[in-house]
Amino acid sequence: MTMHSFQYDPQKNALTGKHHRHSIRLQGYDYSQSGAYFVTICTYGKEHLFGQIVHGEMCLNEFGTIVEGEWITSARIREEISIGEYVIMPNHFHAIAIINDESMNDYYPKNVQQPPIIPSDNTPNGSAPRSISSLMAGFKSSVTKRINQLRKMPGIPVWQRSFHDHIIRDEEDYIRICNYIENNPLKWLDDDEYTL
């Protein structure tokens, strides 16, 4: 299966990507530990399902509203999760998810060496409880179920199998990613995920 590895380019304020034939995760990193994570999920076949960009703003349709509702609900039902900046685009979703731990003073992990964005295996059976993979698997499943009920098409995929994640390393990284998310609709025509 072809995977994608994305890297944030601060000079372009954009994600750049390459195709890979295998999944790359940070070896030995515990994705259930406290921290802030930038996640990206694309729709199956890059289909425009969630609305459209009009004058640099995302206008959600009914499916897009489901995505937003389920993301907010994900944080409500999981006490360890807080959500930061997010944006729903016509064919993908960017968000910051924070795994909280009452004992932590700083949710940026120390001494992380990692390519900024890496594909993740988020199958429910392979997800550690209270992990980013578990969060994303539950979120994707809920969105898929609700959208397929609405369009009366059970079993049709809504999302690509994998999602991309990036461990946010410090406040500068966090602010840069927030700006990227916030400006994503304005830069839609230049987005790597843009399709007609």
Image: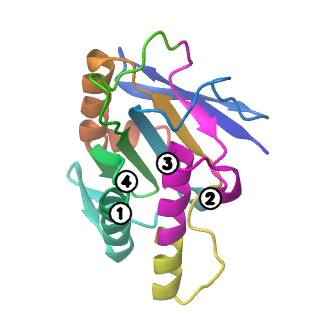
Q: Mark 3 points at which residue?
A: 130
Q: What element carries label 4?
A: loop
Q: From the viewer's side, name the closer residue of 75 and 12.
A: 75
Marks 4/1: CA–CA distance: 24 Å
Q: Quadrant of the N terminus?
A: top right
**Residue at the extreme bottom of the image, as rendered:** 152
Q: Name the residue under label 4.
A: 89
Q: Which amino acid does label 2 sit on?
A: Gly
Q: How crowded is mark 2: few (under 14 residues within 10 Å), some or many (20 or more)?
A: few
The answer to whether residue 195 is seen in the rendering is no
Residue 14 picture location, percent across and down: 40, 27
Marks 1/3: CA–CA distance: 12 Å
Q: Which of marks 4 and 1 is nearer the N terminus?
A: 1
Marks 3/2: CA–CA distance: 29 Å
Q: Which amino acid does label 4 sit on?
A: Met
Question: Is 3 on the left or on the right of 77, as rendered?
Answer: right
Question: Is 71 on the left or on the right of 44, as rendered?
Answer: left
Q: What residue type is labelled 1?
A: Ile
Q: Which of marks 1 and 3 is nearer the N terminus?
A: 1
| Residue at image location 55% in from the left, 50% down from the top | 129
Q: Which of marks 1 and 2 is nearer the N terminus?
A: 2
The answer to whether residue 106 is seen in the rendering is yes
Residue 133 forms part of the magenta stretch: yes
Q: Is mark 3 on a helix, strand or loop?
A: loop
Q: From the viewer's side, name the closer residue of 76 and 45.
A: 76
Residue 100 picture location, percent across and down: 34, 39
Q: Mark 1 points at which residue?
A: 77
Task: Give the extent of the magenta segment.
Answer: 113-142
Q: Mark 2 points at which residue?
A: 45
Q: Is mark 1 on a helix, strand or loop?
A: helix
Q: Earlier in the sequence, mark 4 or mark 2?
A: 2
